[in-house]
Image: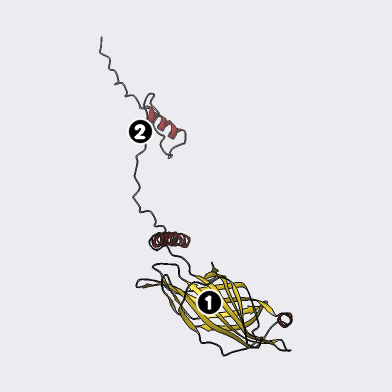
Amino acid sequence: MGDRAYAPASKPVPVAAARAANGVANGGGGGAPRPPPMVPGRVPPPPMYRPKPMQAPPRRRRSRRGWCCACCLWLTLVVVGLVFLGAIAAGVFYVMYHPQLPSFAVTSLRLAALNVSDSDAVTSRIEYTVTARNPNDKIAFAYGDIAAAFSADGADVGDGTVPGFLHPAGNTTVIKGSASASAAAVDPVQANSLRSKKSHSMSVEMDSKVGFQVGRFKSKRINVRVLCSGFTAALAKNTPSPPPIVVAAAPSPIRSLVRASSSPSGGTTTTTTTTDAKCKLRVKIWIWTF
């Protein structure tokens, strides 16, 4: 028998190539190749991670509102700290010295002249004595010029000034002075009241600047007002020359007493009212009065 010659078997065509060939044959050539088929049981790899370049965050500018809040906070803390330190210093000062306010009393007053004209103008002269007492053992007071303003039945009847002085610790000082008015206009109702009455309800306001001294330390002077009321005075018959203003040490004021001296002919010559009318002390700091 003769040998037969067999043609070599053709190689198997890959599925992808076959599909591509079929696509070309079907007129779909030139398109993007399809992704390889998913193999069962195999997970595709994750996409490649490419980190972004690091960038500095943008700087935030502090707003004006933030600056205002910070300034208010610091200012509040400073004020609170100063108040706290001041309270501590005041407490230490009070424990060491036990400060007390001075006391005042009108010990005598003489209405030397009081004339109300038909045009409701007042001309007057008043002589007075005020006793000031310093109850402190280690604190002295330094007074500036004292301005006194008198009123009778609500009408202004005289002004005067007393020179300032130093009030030592534990001292009682008598202040003598005078006040006057020259053709001062008053309200018609008050003028009629001054004409009709023989005894007048008096009051006085004394304004001054006062500072205290402890050893060599001298404080700043502050405004002080002394209000005295609740005493009466009648017009004196004779009018001797006014005494000079005197500031001198004296004992404490005496009880209320009204004295009248008589002349040999039996006529009343002078009327002096001696009283221990107490006064109220008011301290004025800026716009506040205590």
Q: Would residue 254 be visible to someone looking at this image?
A: yes
Using the image, determine if residue 260 lies above or below residue 285.
below
**Which quarter of the rendering shows the C terminus?**
bottom right
Q: What residue is at 50 percent from the left and 79 percent from the top?
A: 175
Quarter occupied by residue 114: bottom right
Q: Would residue 61 be visible to someone looking at this image?
A: no
Amino acid type for the residue under numbered disc 2: Pro
Q: What residue is at 34 percent from the left and 50 percent from the top?
A: 54
Amino acid type for the residue under numbered disc 1: Val
From the viewer's perspective, is 273 left or right of 45?
A: right
Using the image, determine if residue 178 lies above or below residue 41.
below
Q: Secondary structure at mark 1?
A: strand
Q: Secondary structure at mark 2?
A: loop
Percent of width and height locating residue 83: 43, 61
Mark 2: few/some/many CA within 10 Å (<14, 14-19, 20+):
few
* Residue to which mark 1 is pinned: 130
**In this view, the mark in front (1 or 2):** 1
Percent of width and height locating residue 247: 47, 81
- Looking at the image, is mark 1 or mark 2 earlier in the sequence? 2
Outermost residue to the top: 1
Using the image, determine if residue 75 lies above or below residue 122.
above
Pick the residue in front: 15 or 131. Answer: 131
Pick the residue in front: 145 or 108. Answer: 108
Q: What residue is at 56 percent from the left and 84 percent from the top?
A: 178
* Residue to which mark 2 is pinned: 45
Using the image, determine if residue 14 lies above or below residue 115.
above
Percent of width and height locating residue 131: 51, 75
